[in-house]
Amino acid sequence: MRTGGALRCPNMQPLAPRDLDQYREKGFLVVRNVFRPDEVLDVARETEGLLSRADLMDQKNLRVRWQVHVETMDPVFELYDPIVDIAPHCHAWAHDPRVLGAVGKLLGDEAHLIKDKLIYKPAGAGGYPLHQDFIAWPGFPESFTTVVVAIDPATEANGWIKVHPGAHAKGCLAERDGNFHILDDALVDASAAVSLDLAPGDIAIYGGFMPHQSAPNRSPTQRRHLLFSYNAAKDGGEQRASHYEAFHHYLRSVYSMMGLADMHFR
């Protein structure tokens, strides 16, 4: 099932009551044409330029991660996390009133940026199994809400994101032990999944309890998405710095178990 009932909102007018009702019921919302083609072009150029940052593309740098090519098994560069401190146009999008206004309306509170990443999803990159973004380490906000902004079109061939309407209402579906968990497919109705067929400039919004997944990119081109995550003011307020401190501690422990030491952040 593909996305239905998406808003077409070139000037990003305030969300209507029916949009809030849909978000509460289904757990996600798609808004079309939030960013103009010229704005998308600026961000696309900026993200292409970041692919030449050899100083950052160090496998011991906690900012970057690689995937394994699904056919050749070679490493392929996947993402920057975080991104807004090295990319002014991406920073502007993360703090754009059109985005903050929509998220704030859905949260019923002021939205604070807590996490930001740029996923390139190059040709051959693997997907992600069924999971939720909520990770139950101490202080992780239950209001965690992600805005996916498409730079490139999302298609079935390049591994679009699939969400499971209504499943967010079940809350946390994994152990609250502070670890990332792959969810059992039986926890959701696969036949009711919705594919987020985003065009450049479109956004999709879903909360931390929304189960979602994506397939590998089997197309010949990359599929860039920016993912900006926010929490409510009443749910911890400004905590981006503390989030990344905790996240880097978590990554170091994971890499240590893989025999990788001397990790750094640059």
Image: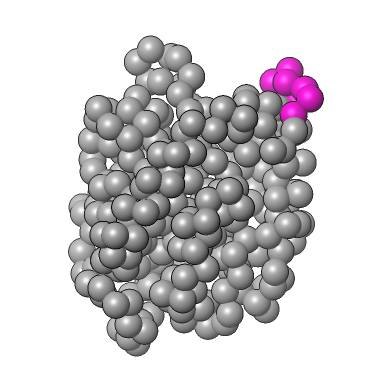
8 to the left or right of 23: left
Q: Is residue 154 visible?
A: yes
The residue at the point 40 percent across, 20 percent down is 69
Q: Is residue 66 above or below residue 203?
A: above
Q: Position of residue 7 (x, y in %)?
A: 25, 72
The residue at the point 56 percent across, 54 percent down is 84
Magenta stretch: includes residue 259: yes
Q: Position of residue 107 (x, y in %)?
A: 52, 77
In front of the other: 7 or 171: 7
- The tally of labels here is 0
In front of the other: 130 or 66: 66
Q: Which of the 4 image quadrants contains residue 260?
A: top right
Residue lying furthest bottom: 17
The segment highlighted magenta reads 256-263
Magenta stretch: includes residue 242: no
Q: Is residue 164 visible?
A: no
9 to the left or right of 107: left
In front of the other: 50 or 29: 50
53 to the left or right of 154: right
Q: Is residue 262 above or below residue 45?
A: above
The residue at the point 46 percent across, 63 percent down is 93
The residue at the point 29 percent across, 60 percent down is 38
The rendered magenta stretch, by its main secondary structure, is classed as loop
Q: Position of residue 94 (x, y in %)?
A: 50, 63
Q: Position of residue 82 (x, y in %)?
A: 60, 48
